[in-house]
Image: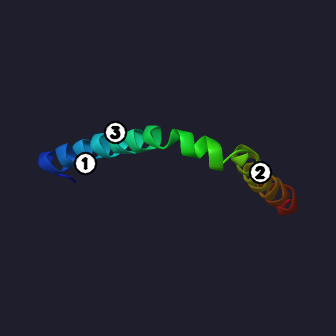
Amino acid sequence: MFSTGQLYFAAFFVVVFVAAMIYVYRKDLKLHKKYYKGSYWILIAFLAFIAILFCIKYFVKE
C-alpha cells in the first residue's frame, strides 16, 4: 500500500511535528495560564453535551 520511503517520511513528519508542537506550547505556557483560565470547564461542558446527544440518540432509537 505504501512504500518504505513513504512510511519513513510519515514517521519522521509525525515525530518532528509533535516535537515542534510541544516546544511551541511550552514556550507559550505562561500566556496560556494567564489568558485561558477556566477553559477546562468549556471542554467539560462540550464533552458532556456530546455525551448527552449520544444518550438521546441511543434511547430514542428504540
Asked where in the image residue 59 lies, by quadrant, the reply is bottom right
Percent position (x, y) of residue 20? 34, 44
Q: Looking at the image, tell me whether mark 2 or mark 3 is earlier in sequence order.
A: 3
- Between 36 and 2, the one lying in front of the other is 36
Percent position (x, y) of residue 56? 84, 58
Q: SS of the residue at dot 3?
A: helix
Q: Amino acid at mark 2?
A: Ala
Q: Residues within 10 Å of mark 1 (few under 14, many from 20)?
A: few
Q: Looking at the image, tell me whether mark 1 or mark 3 is earlier in sequence order.
A: 1
Q: Looking at the image, tell me whether mark 1 or mark 2 is earlier in sequence order.
A: 1
Mark 1 — residue? 10
Q: Are marks 1 and 2 in contact (CB under 8 Å)?
A: no
Q: Amino acid at mark 3?
A: Ala
For the residues labelled 2 and 3, the Cα–Cα distance comes to 32 Å
Q: SS of the residue at dot 2?
A: helix
Percent position (x, y) of residue 51? 77, 51
Asked where in the image residue 4 lies, by quadrant, the reply is top left
- Between 62 and 8, the one lying in front of the other is 8
- Between 62 and 1, the one lying in front of the other is 1
* Quadrant position of the N terminus in the picture: bottom left
Q: SS of the residue at dot 1?
A: helix
Q: Residues within 10 Å of mark 2 (few under 14, many from 20)?
A: few
Q: Nearer the viewer, mark 1 or mark 3?
A: 3
Mark 2 — residue? 51
* Quadrant position of the C terminus in the picture: bottom right
Image position of 2 (left or right of 43): left
Image position of 56 (left or right of 37): right
Q: Residues within 10 Å of mark 3 (few under 14, many from 20)?
A: few
For the residues labelled 1 and 3, the Cα–Cα distance comes to 14 Å
Percent position (x, y) of residue 48? 79, 49
Mark 3 — residue? 19
